[in-house]
Amino acid sequence: MTAATVGRPVGWPPGMAGGVAAGLGAGAFWGTTFIAPLLTPGFSFIDLTVGRYLACGVLAVVLLLWAGLRGQARWPTPRQMGAALWLSLLGYTGYYLLLVLAIQAAGAALPVLIIGTIPLWIMLLGKPLGLRWRALVPGVLLTAAGMALMVRASAHGADGAVGDGPGFWLGIFYAVLAMAAWTAFGLLNARWLLRHPQVNSTEWANWLGVAAGLGALAIWAVAGSDLDVLVQRPGLGPFLLVCAVTGIGAAWIASVLWNMASRRLSPSLAGQLIVSETVFGLVYTFAWNGQWPAPVQWAACLLFVLGILASIQAHR
């Protein structure tokens, strides 16, 4: 056994184990975004989106300045910054704004479920040319079966869904738009990283973070609450904490981890790992609500995990 194979499962291609671990870590951080609106009931979705991505942008600027002081900063070209602005709109501010709108209108569980279909779309749209379609069938079927069980649980009111009025269906519409935006981001981001190997995962996360911070400022200028109103609003401390945790953890750290996974894995396998976001999001939601998942929901989570394992096996 060579030094390159130490620490990874036997039979795994080089870098695959690290990519899978990075993808699962990103899912664990992303899962926190589903309960963020539930933790800050006194603040609007605009305030939450702006706060989260301002925190991410501030951290990215600090890290870039620190690297500049040490003479290690790499600054993007205008074209690269344009790509960062566009992709940050798809996968950061635009996506999360739509998701928060969906959660506020329809509750957390069904938007989590719709967002959970992203792995299926990325698996189908990002399949490597050398991988046969039939190799993806077990992972796709297991994931689809898990989603079907979650739909059944939602239909029986086991997940705290808001209801079936006009607001509920508007929330579902927002969730579908969020799903489409992040699917496009996942595929385009992986393609960009492949074409720019000289930009490491942390640098790209910093550039995306700065772009997301600028996007957050634009949203705040157009539709955000006045600073005086925010300061006087009850629950400011928890709100700032949630913004910091989701901005640093679910935005910046998760971005670094996802960039690592995107570099080491094919889009179809990396996309499958996004199912972990759904699992973590459900776990966090149920923990916050102080209730156990129904048996059908436990079964769905098990199918999600089996789907991840089947996809890993197909890509080995």
Image: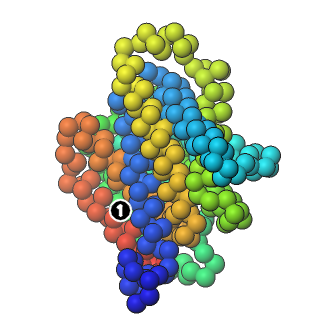
Q: Dot 1 surroundings within 10 Å: few (below 14), some, or many (20 or more)? A: many
Q: Residue 166, how many percent across, how many down? A: 47, 29
Looking at the rendered structure, the number of numbered marks drawn on it comes to 1
Locate residue 90 relative to residue 166 in the image: left or right.
right
Classify mark 1: helix, strand or loop.
helix
- Of residues 80 and 280, the one drawn nearer to the viewer in this rendering: 80
- Of residues 115 and 273, the one drawn nearer to the viewer in this rendering: 273
Mark 1 lies on residue:
304
- Of residues 231 and 144, the one drawn nearer to the viewer in this rendering: 231
- Callout 1 amino acid: Phe
Q: Residue at x 24, y 41 (%)?
A: 287
Q: Residue 190, how many percent across, how many down? A: 62, 61
- Of residues 266 and 21, the one drawn nearer to the viewer in this rendering: 21
Q: Residue 98, how many percent across, how many down? A: 54, 36
Q: Residue at x 32, y 47 (%)?
A: 282
Q: Residue at x 37, y 72 (%)?
A: 309
Q: Residue 279, how many percent across, how many down? A: 34, 53
Quarter of the figure that contains the N terminus:
bottom left
